[in-house]
Image (cartoon, helix red, strand yellow):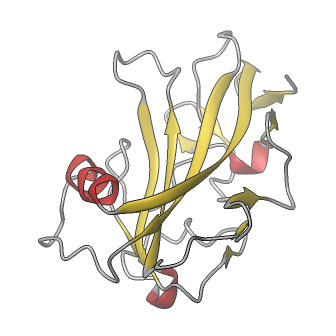
Amino acid sequence: MGNFTMTSPEFEDQDPLQLVHEFNGFDGAGQNRSPALQWQGAPEGTKSFALTLYDPDAPTGSGFWHWILFDIDPSVTRLAAGAGSAGATDLGASGTQAANDYGLTGYGGPCPPVGLPAHRYIFTVHALSTPKLELPANPTNAVVRFVINQNTLAAATLTGLYKRSARGVAMTV
């Protein structure tokens, strides 16, 4: 059995994300496009996947959850660029999207305050021991994450970095 890993054709681990990934709202001027992601080496017994995107550096006291996707069919091992950007709850075999901390369903891109050091955006794919999370309608992302964590067999992460120097201008890190 190989190691459980996640990669992206758009960025390497610890490399900068792009302006196209930035949130389009508040004072963000990006296209709010989720990056393409792929994973391999899930452990035996994986019955579904879940994906989260978290910024532990957000000045909130508790970080910021940018994307929660769950009930991904075990046959799915990649998400196309923009897969989470539709705002749709049900993505078929690619899972169900929960509300992010922006209060929107689906992917909400990075939008750290201008002038702060780069924030870390941690994409995590969870290999789950259950085919469905069996959640109530419109669960909060905290409830979804709790149930994901209760059913995780293994997890793989990929971290992108992002900072802004001026409104609508992404900076490399």
Would you say 25 lies left or right of 156 here?
Answer: left
Would you say 48 lies left or right of 164 here?
Answer: left
Residue at figure coordinates x 74%, y 67% from the top left: 2
Depth check: 163 or 57 in front?
57
Would you say 8 lies left or right of 29 here?
Answer: right
Q: Where is residue 42 in the image (x, y as percent from the top left)?
A: 61, 71
Residue 148: name its quadrant. bottom left
Q: How many labels does the image show?
A: 0
Would you say 124 lies left or right of 18 here?
Answer: left
Depth check: 12 or 127 in front?
127
Looking at the rendering, in which quadrant would you find the N terminus? bottom right
Residue at figure coordinates x 88%, y 27% from the top left: 172
Q: Position of residue 24 (x, y in %)?
A: 59, 46
Residue 136: name its quadrant. bottom left
Residue at figure coordinates x 69%, y 76% from the top left: 78
Q: Is residue 116 above or below residue 51?
A: above
Looking at the rendering, in which quadrant would you find the C terminus? top right
Depth check: 82 or 37 in front?
37
Q: Which residue lies furthest to the left in this view?
A: 136
Residue at figure coordinates x 20%, y 52% from the top left: 143
Q: Where is residue 34 in the image (x, y as percent from the top left)?
A: 65, 59
Q: Where is residue 152 in the image (x, y as percent from the top left)?
A: 39, 60
Q: Is residue 137 above or below residue 53?
A: below
Q: Residue furthest front?
A: 1
Q: Is residue 92 above or below residue 16?
A: below
